[in-house]
Image (cartoon, rainbow, N blue to C red):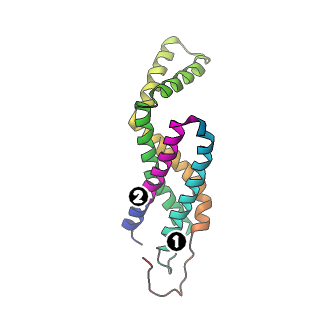
Amino acid sequence: MSNKIFWRQAARAGTILGLAMVGIQLISDAVPQTASVMWWLHYIVFIGLLYGFTRNMARKADPRIGFGYARALGFVLAMMVFTGFLLGAYTFIAAKTFMYDATLQQIDTMMEIYATMPMFANQMDGMYDMVRSMMFSPVFRIISEILGYFITGLFFGLFTSAFAKINPNPFAGNQTPE
């Protein structure tokens, strides 16, 4: 299996997973009463799609070479880059539009916590400006979501890769399933 196919499949799977996660997050943001149900749904869909896409990729591998644990985990982490990018773009757009007031409330809550720490007044002003610029920065939002999903994907990928891997079969012949 070439790197081109690997990255194309990782991009496709990560995009589908990212769109599913954006949809769940959008419902959770629009109807806050469903947040706890959406939290469970998020992880069920996430793990299910993660396993399904990884297993599908493993089935496309050459049976003589297989699709080992490390390759499966690498595929999961590659998917997470694309998933995190989409979620980062969503959180940025949401923070700038329909979640603007909620984002400001988050910033105020953080500043109340920081106010209990021993700081000078000019440090608090600088802290407020820094936090506000980070919360409304597309670069910060996208990078933080990519890192967050990378860590989440690493954790769940440790388990799903163990079940999705396919060991090599040296007696499989020369056919490659595609």
The three-letter amino acid code for the residue at tag 1 is Phe
Image vertical order of residue 109 relative to residue 51, above or below: above
Give the number of the mark in front: 1 or 2: 2
> Residue 122's x, y, as percent?
48, 13
Q: Quadrant of residue 13?
A: bottom left
Tell me the quarter of the image containing the N terminus: bottom left
> Is 90 positioned to the left or the right of 157 in the image?
left
Instruction: Kindly state the secondary structure of the residue where label 1 is placed.
Output: loop
> Residue 37's x, y, as percent?
62, 44
User: How many callouts does the rendering have?
Assistant: 2
Name which residue lies at 44% across and 86% down.
Answer: 174
Is the residue under label 2 in contact with that under label 1 (CB below 8 Å)?
no
Instruction: Kindly state the secondary structure of the residue where label 2 is placed.
Output: helix
Front residue of 131 and 92: 92
Q: Residue furthest left?
A: 4
Mark 1 to mark 2 CA distance (whole Å): 18 Å
Q: Identify residue for label 2.
A: 11
Name which residue lies at 41% across and 41% down.
Answer: 89
Q: Identify residue for label 1.
A: 67
Image vertical order of residue 174 relative to residue 73, above or below: below
Magenta residue check for 110 = no
- Magenta segment, which residues? 11-32
Tell me the quarter of the image containing the C terminus: bottom left
Q: Quadrant of residue 69?
A: bottom right
Name which residue lies at 50% across and 27% down.
Answer: 102
Name which residue lies at 50% across and 77% down.
Answer: 65
| Label 2 crowd bin: few (<14), some (14–19), many (20+), radius 10 Å | some
| First along the sequence among labels 1 and 2 | 2
> Residue 99's x, y, as percent?
46, 31
The three-letter amino acid code for the residue at tag 2 is Ala
- Magenta stretch: helix, strand or loop mostly: helix
